Image (cartoon, rainbow, N blue to C red):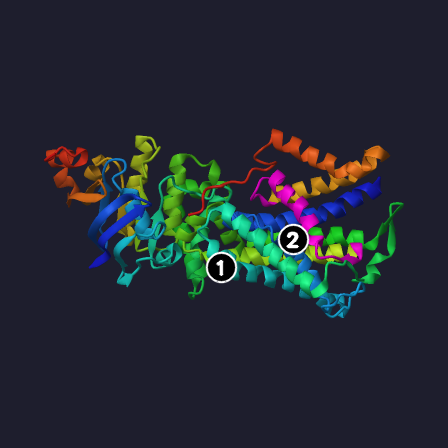
Amino acid sequence: MSLLVLANIEVRYGRLTAVRGVSLSIKDGDTVFITGPNGAGKSSLLRAIAGVTPASNGTIDFDGYNITGKAPEDIARLGFSMVPEGRDVFGSLTIEENLMVGTGMKAKDRGWKAKRAEDLEAVYQTFPILKERRHGQAGLLSGGQQQMLVIGRALMTNPRLIAIDEPSLGLAPNITDQVYERLIALQSLRALTLLIVEQSSTRANLVGGRMLLMRGGQIVLDGDARELGNSAAVQAAYFGYEDH
Amino acid sequence: MLQIVFDSLSLGSLYALGALGIALIFGVMRLVNFAHGDVIAFSIFALLWPSTDAMAIVFAGQLPWYLLIPFVLLVGAGLSVLCEIVVFRRFRRANPATMMIASFALGFVIRYFLLMLFTSRPKSISLLPMLSQPVEIFGARLPLLQLITIIATVIILIGLTLFLRRTRFGLEMRAAAENFSMARMLGIRANRVIMGAFALSGALAGAIAMIFGSQTGTVDIQMGASIMLMAFIATVIGGLGSLAGAVLAGFLLGAASVIMQVVLPVDARPFRDAFVYGAVILVLLFRPQGLIAARGTKERV
């Protein structure tokens, strides 16, 4: 079943068009990488789905609901959790407070507090460093720890899908490895759908799953990440060698 | 000496509460709300019948104190929320300068509305008259009111801190103040948080109105403007958006005003404010980001 369906999405900033007519359907439980060079429109596409910079054209359906033009908070409440580029921790809040910020949307459910405590324990189990420093200021964490914190924060909202914009940005390769290791473990544990934006396709090749390649605001390649590998087709699409 | 301390604290209380009201709203929506001063004036005039007399015709002001105080706080909160729903909500995506101009305009609308009903003549009013008797503490004679002002301010500050630190809504407000866009992506309802900030800020305006009205014994449609200016300066010195900074700077400004009144040579005293503002410029030259720089002065999306 398709969890996320985009039809002909276009994103414009004034006269600049960042995304030109992207159509795409993502199945429940999939891992999908969106790769492509700088300025390909990857982040813009993600921000449009999350409702942060609304698409100027096209429709977006999530979990059977039309979310086109909806406010970011309403989209988040349907189970779409966005982890933007640059991580955006709430630096003045403690780590535990950061994790709690997004849990209010379920506050009307029965047994919410118990469920929240359970979720918190699960996040702490995945990322023990967060538990260790839970009363410390989030702004003082290292880049890798912050990345773990924002993933944990997204998990606390019990999402259907987590969209992550460049989780490897500014992290040492071995830290990036750790982050991905946990992400993949979480996914199989929780039947999560992952939508990950990365500039390079190497990570997608390692992890596997579906890979989309964007360039000039369009999807130019769509296939299995391992099969595509670093093939000539990928390179051609990435750098735009073909038929100019 | 003790007299100076208490004078500083009670004047500083007014500035601190005012600055807090501005900082709360700036935190969540990057709006410098210049209508805040007029909300202060409005909350106190809501106690009076419209008239042009110099003697105020008290209407709700005759309520006993335990009803009077909530009434004024509610009026402030109500008007402030109304401002947000009717005016500021339409400017959500506007740039901060546009919002600031809109708040100026709104302030004038409120002020002229009061002018129409009450004229510009200051009115004498006696709120909570039992508080004007002096009390003696450590050999200093202080008006009871001054003491109560300080105590009330401390209670408000503690209450607000607890609210922000211990409640769900407080957590959401702090998150939203630091990074509004990210908070929304975590499902926090933008309108609710902003309305909450306006309600709190308006209630603070009501508290200032009560204190100022009882201290001076007069009400004047301009009364908000003078406090507002100092409060605004306090929020800037404190570091725009930083609540702790706003409070600290408010008290510092109060102290500076009182101390200069005492230390300056008699001839220079009429120019006290020039010295206070001079000190403000000095502070900003050395710490342009404010005493306590706010985190996440990131653009609101």
The dot on residue B170 is none
Q: Which residues are magenta?
A: B216-243
Q: Position of residue A141 (x, y in %)?
A: 45, 37
**Image height of B49 relative to A95, above or below:** below
Question: As rendered, which of B16 and B47 lies closer to the eye?
Answer: B47
Disc 1 element:
helix
Please name which of the two marks, 1 or 2, marks the residue nearer to the observer. 2
Residue drawn at the location 86% of the way across and 35% of the way down: B266
Disc 2 is placed on an element classified as: helix
Relative horizontal placement of residue B224, taking residue B143 as reference (left or right): left
A127 horizontally vs B3: left or right: left
Regarding residue B221, the answer to whether it shows in the image is: yes
Observer-nearest of B34 and B259? B34
- Nearest the camera: A93 or B60? B60
Q: Main secondary structure of the magenta part?
A: helix
What residue is disc 2 on?
A: B37
Q: Nearer the viewer, residue A132 or A83?
A: A83
Whole-percent x, y for residue A11 in the image? 29, 48
Using the image, name the chain to which the residue with label 2 belongs. B
Q: Quadrant of the C terminus of chain A?
A: top left
Q: Which residue is mark 1?
A: B192
